[in-house]
Amino acid sequence: MCRRDEAGLFFAPSKEPTAARLSREEAAKRVCARCPVMVECREHALLQPEPYGVWGGLTAAERRVVLARRRRRDMELKKTARQGRIAAAG
């Protein structure tokens, strides 16, 4: 769906005022919300990681938060697995 829209909706022009950026990002997210491949697009942007623009309904800042949460979750899972192996061996 985003291919039919202007790329400017998904990527910020230089020196965009905050109010304009927030409005543009919300409009881009509305397009994303109707997209049949939103989840795939989001995962692509998280795996690359794409540093700019709205992808899969998330801004670059929102994607950074998701990635940080995933890293913390992965670390906790590894820690739990390691503790389980130690307990099983002991």
Image (cartoon, grey):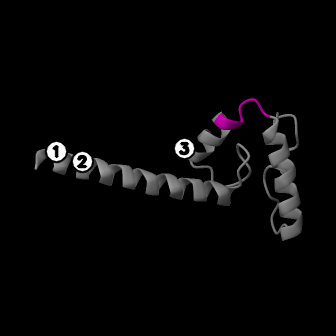
Estimate the spatial distance between the alpha carbons at disc 1 and disc 2, rounded to whole Å: 6 Å
Taking the magenta stretch, the answer to whether it contains residue 54 is no
Q: Residues within 10 Å of mark 1 (few under 14, many from 20)?
A: few
CA separation in Å, label 3 and label 1:
34 Å
Residue beneath the point at 80% across and 58% down: 12
* Picture coordinates of residue 69, whole percent (x, y): 52, 56
Mark 2 residue element:
helix
User: Decide: marks 1, 2 in contact (CB < 8 A)?
Assistant: yes
**Drawn side of residue 10 relative to residue 71, left or right:** right
Q: Nearer the viewer, residue 55 or 29?
A: 29
Q: Which residue is mark 2?
A: 84
Measuring from the top left, give residue 33's x and y in whole percent.
79, 40
Mark whose residue sits in front, 2 or 3: 2
Q: Earlier in the sequence, mark 3 or mark 1?
A: 3
Give the residue type that dot 3 points to: Leu
Lower sequence index among marks 2 and 3: 3
User: Could you say which is closer to the camera, residue 20 or residue 34?
Assistant: 34
Eyeballing the image, is 19 above or below 64? below
Residue at image mark 1: 88
Location of mark 3 (residue): 47
Q: Is residue 84 left or right of residue 3?
A: left
- Residue 34 visible at all: yes
Which residues are drawn in magenta? Answer: 35-39
